[in-house]
């Protein structure tokens, strides 16, 4: 392989740049997953995840991709033919819906424009209509990784409550957890789905279900077949810090380190940092005269920004120029917006100067690709970043 | 945590001691799983696994534990209520049977003594009885990790053929692959299940299905629900070296390294090494006057040896002494043989002197635990090892 | 320690950002430095260094900092009281002169302005004056790390020749080797001094002497005492790839990797990359309306740029703001220019986007520190970089 | 390179097996050696070394091999022509004497048999004879790495005192520090020389001088030329945790980790462990009917054991067999005992089972090489080790 000097800029919206501390942690020797030392590690990470999901309830860890945690959320709580309500916020909502369908559920999939989040009013209306409570679960993607649009999970909770509907509430936080404020308990979420490779700063390979008491109760009656994803043996073994089958030990080492790092920085500082970088990125986009895919400012994602290409320009051609010339990976447009948008990931282990490098790469790439831009977006971003940066933050500060 | 000088001896029958080359490989920066560089890696490992399974057919890689690959084998090939034939060779056969049951299959589970492998004659008889071909699959565990007994997969194939029965043949090689000779194509196996953390010398977190054309055909009609485990999108994406959902990138780096290491040593040398270490271990066990759990010499495992404790002595007490005094983890007796046996793993990245250290630890532990032993098993092992060792081997030699 | 998100920007002019490949290489297990495998490694690095120094003669490797290699150059070639000619190009020339003095040499130290390199005409004049050939060596620093000024080593060689003077020619390339074109043989250098932690992309701890036949001849008569630095036992042991005393094995692993990386990229591509980054940096400096310390364009360093602060502004205050707010380390002004300049390192394992991040950090820092700047230097740099970048390069291309 | 399965057994008496924690530490990104974070690290290691040398005085850290620290001890304290008293305890005493000679000192080198340490009575007699106090320093090697013989440093101190002689006392602890009890202050040593790659469990590349007030006073008048090795600028810079020239940053990361590990285990436990392993090794040697090179039991080294080959057998042939067949490196006989002895290193990060593997390799190797042995030395070692092992120890216990 040709050596390219310097570090690759991995600015897709996940997997994110894994920090050295985490990489070093995962390369420690694998240990006996049934020995006493493992139990200590297991308890540490199982406990340590709770404040990150903002829950006092259990968090299940699967040796699997985030896609597996989607499946786990569904098969543990639902029965064949159960109706679930989903909204087409983008590619990942679409994929989750396809999975639900494949697993034998009946999905009411409300069409969307791929530029907006889940409308709480819509949910309220749909649930109010559903007098017979045939809808068993409402599923929402907190941060649509394909569009850079967040759905307002707390408001949707209020909509469900307003409708007085008993549906379970399942939320995908794969690309928001530990990047954007999220509150499993406060927002009354029943199953929060997440993954390791975004805000948690780990390589892919672990995924999560944070589960409410209501979800646990549902799991005892749910009729979909399950074995690998079954919460019950997990909950039993987790009590002493162990797992019912071989866990992905080395990724758990990394998880321990990542939990420590997030606590050292402090979650509020983590969120503020992501907000600042997202705002700087949007200012750059506007500086270039390009359009942000997300329509509503209150739904802007702090984890990534999807940018619409001007008519007649292909996003993948741009991404190729940027990868070839500047060794930076950006996210492709997926599904319905393929070729039309590119996505800038600004989440995970990240800082102002790496963002400046990232935006510089986009700006130079736009020019090289012949995409007309109005002015320097980088200059706009720097003007904001210099002001907004308030120096090193830590949990103790 | 208290620091213990020197390296831990991880002599459970997996996860095995992950070699430094693999650990260093997995701590490289995570890359874009949709970028061009990833495609090169993906193809490399997908191709590179084939000679290890001895197949020309595809091998599916799941970001999951071996348990997941069990589930994948079943849900891709079978339909609700289908009958499968399994034999109780030990704990893992039992767990696989429980999973099959949970997934809605009908299991004929033939009782076993936990000291023998699957009897080919039994299979032949059972299949001959099954005139109506209600048995849709025969499932066997190649190397029962709980007992140190191998089943003769080639002979069972012949038994199936002799019965002229169309059942699928599913084999678990989690603790045998890349340690004990195994031939997916030659032995007509339809789905070979395996995992990363044993002979492949990786941390846990990847698992595999090698699949025959017949299995692929079956998967198109199989009625069990599947999504995460579905082969079809895997096969489609794998063609260009990609995966339908985020793969466990860093473990794939390790897989590449492990494939290279196995090819450097040469599979035949790998198998001969495991055979030699297993024979040395059995000589040690006999030297101590203890009994090997495996009854039939032709079914001795080259990956691990399970040792029966003398009446009145508890294996877990022994293991605790050995862990506390000598920082060595041994495998516990599982299920029906809990407390009655301990298991010595001698598989994966291993050599003569580490085996000598391992057996020395067992011998000293037996004495400290008050277990009466006849003579020095270590001496027997060394006498054999010194003779049997023929120096460094490599594929090129 | 407070965790700071993202990667630190280590933009001092060395130690440079050590690439992951090198870091992973140095963490392999230490080996027997007298065993056969070591001999292979030793020969590899001893041979592999030659094209980097552009010499066919031996290169000596010391387990020591660059300062040690300065000492080695002097004690191997000179005798007590010998006169050496040096020019005050900056802090490192001054330190080398102090060392020469401390070792009992007589130094003629020509005063300089810390903004210019060694003037070849001056050397010619001095040597012509020295009819009695009392000057035994001319010492020059190729790249003055304290000022960002290079001396034209080839022209100085011509000056020595023009004077018909037999003085040895000793050159410090600590911060230029593998960043700026350098030719030990072609330029008739007798001892080239270098270190590991700059263009070679290693951590500090190794240093080098590339030596001409004339230097070797001199070393046989040189009267300064020497033991650790003595070339003779080194040359003898190096023949088979070994060292007379314990080498810094793990840094040698890194050296092997670094040699491979430089050859993969191709030295000419490495130099062009450094030239491009230096030019972009100077454009940024001019964009800010600040002054480059180096006076003469033909002496601009491609490894670092020293920038003069406007009257009334302290460079260390600026550096502190930048470190605190943006987690970037810049080089301080040293010696006579302490507080008056800051230095931007743009050498080693580096790329366009990291440079963009670096310059962005300086620009934002200048504003935050209240240093008046004219316009966006980053914009100037990006305009140039976008044009000048010609994509991934490799030796094979 | 041919891949050899399992871990190499690096049983030379140093460099020792570097523990994973240290290897992981040294592969962290290099930092600014003049930045605030470095100062914290610098102070930590400079302070942390003191209890390991058992001194309250400064310890100097050189980026250099142990050989450099020998030179530093001499050039900082002595003047040209000064007389030093040394005893030929083996190869390293001989090399130090050669260095002293090369540096212009006058060495009285008392012949030895390479099987005994420095005789305190001899020192007393020599010093009493020296009425005019022409002897300026007594130099002793605490643990002769070439012979496995320790000299009793405390008794030699008493001998110097008994003679009422003002000579400085310089001691090499390169292969004893952090393995065998050593007390710089209590034993009145003026300069203790040491290195990183033995009991400190680091790769080679750092070396040390622990210095008494008397040594510091001497350094102010000492006439040997010095620059790199000069303590004065070190002491000045060390006050704030910095160094006068670029330190070997990444090895300092490892040093920090090693200090932590030694404190976690507790120095007394470290020494007891080394004593136990040395005793087990000697029992093995006697079991084989071979002779230990060290003559006097009170001078047995706890760090290594040198073993005499029977007449007619070459130690290097044996070592080759063992390296080829069992992938274990043993120490060669050096200098006068080349070919006649082999050396087993049992120091550093080591434990009972690795020792058992080591001795097993020697025993099998002896047989394969046709060296007649009486009985199983391994059996003798195991009998002792099983009894002597008292389980995991830590500083807190």
Image (tube, coloured by chain):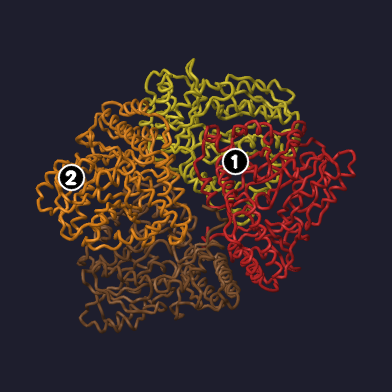
Chain colours: A orange, B brown, C yellow, D red
Asked if residue C159 lies left or right of residue A249, the reply is right
Q: Taking D121 as reference, is A303 left or right?
A: left
Task: Give the percent coordinates (x, y) of residue A220.
Answer: 24, 61
- Relative image position of residue D168 (x, y in whole percent): 79, 40
Residue at image mark 2: A161
Task: Determine if marks 1 and 2 fall on one subunit.
Answer: no
Q: Which residue is drawn at 57% across and 24% down?
A: C117
Q: Quadrant of the C terminus of chain C?
A: top left
Pointer 1 residue: D45
What's the residue at 70%, 49% (across, down)? D182
Q: In this view, does B229 lie above or below D209?
A: below
Crowd tier of the residue under label 1, counting other residues whose Cα lies within 10 Å: few below 14, some 14–19, many 20 or above: many
- Is B328 rendered above or below residue C198? below
- Taking the image as shown, residue C263 lies to the left or right of residue D387, namely left
What x and y, as percent, mark residue A152? Answer: 22, 40
- Chain letter for mark 2, please: A
Name the residue rendered at 58%, 37% in the picture. Answer: D42
Compared across the picture, whether D2 is left or right of B244 comes to: right
How far, Cα to Cα, is label 1 from label 2? 59 Å
- The number of numbered badges drawn on the structure is 2
Judged from the image, the secondary structure of the residue bearing numbered disc 1 is helix
Picture quadrant where residue A230 is located: bottom left
Front residue of B360/B54: it is B360
Task: Name the residue: 22% across, 51% down.
Answer: A95
Residue that extends furthest to the top in the rendered view of this protein:
C311
Give me the disc on residue C344: none
Mark 2, other Cα within 10 Å: few <14 / some 14–19 / many ≥20: some
């Amino acid at each position: 392989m040709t050596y390219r000097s310097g570090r690759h800029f991995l600015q897709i919206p996940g997997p994110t740049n894994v920090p050295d501390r985490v990489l070093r942690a995962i390369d420690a020797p694998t240990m006996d997953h049934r020995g006493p030392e493992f139990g200590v590690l297991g308890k540490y990470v199982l406990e340590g995840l709770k404040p990150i999901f903002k829950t006092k309830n259990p968090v299940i860890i699967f040796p699997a991709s985030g896609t597996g945690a989607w499946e786990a959320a569904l098969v543990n709580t639902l029965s064949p033919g159960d109706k679930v309500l989903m909204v087409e916020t983008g590619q990942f909502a679409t994929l989750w819906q396809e999975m639900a369908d494949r697993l034998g559920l009946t999905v009411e999939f409300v069409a969307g424009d791929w530029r907006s989040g889940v409308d709480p009013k819509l949910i309220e209306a749909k649930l109010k209509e559903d007098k017979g409570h045939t809808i068993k679960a409402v599923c929402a993607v907190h941060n649509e990784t394909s569009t850079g649009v967040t759905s307002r999970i707390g408001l949707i909770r209020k909509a469900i409550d307003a409708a007085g509907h008993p549906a379970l509430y399942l939320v995908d936080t794969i690309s928001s957890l530990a990047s954007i404020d999220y509150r499993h308990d406060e927002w009354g979420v029943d199953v929060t789905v997440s993954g390791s490779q975004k805000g948690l700063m780990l390589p892919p390979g672990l995924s999560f279900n944070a589960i409410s008491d209501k979800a646990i109760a549902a799991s005892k009656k749910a009729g979909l077949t399950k074995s690998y994803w079954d919460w019950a043996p997990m909950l039993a073994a987790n009590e002493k810090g162990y797992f019912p089958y071989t866990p992905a030990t080395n990724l758990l080492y990394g998880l321990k380190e990542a939990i420590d790092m997030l606590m050292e920085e402090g979650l509020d500082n983590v969120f503020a940092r992501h907000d600042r970088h997202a705002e700087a990125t949007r200012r750059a986009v506007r500086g270039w005269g390009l359009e942000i895919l997300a329509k509503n400012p209150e739904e802007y994602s702090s984890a990534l920004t999807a940018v619409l290409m001007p008519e007649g320009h292909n996003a993948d051609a741009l991404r190729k120029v940027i990868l070839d010339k500047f060794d930076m990976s950006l996210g492709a447009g997926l599904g319905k917006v393929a070729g039309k948008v590119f996505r800038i990931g600004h989440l995970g282990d990240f800082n102002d100067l790496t963002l400046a490098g990232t935006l510089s790469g986009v700006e130079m790439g736009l020019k090289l690709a012949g995409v007309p831009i109005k002015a320097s977006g980088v200059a706009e971003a720097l003007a904001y970043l210099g002001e907004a940066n308030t120096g090193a933050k830590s949990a103790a500060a």
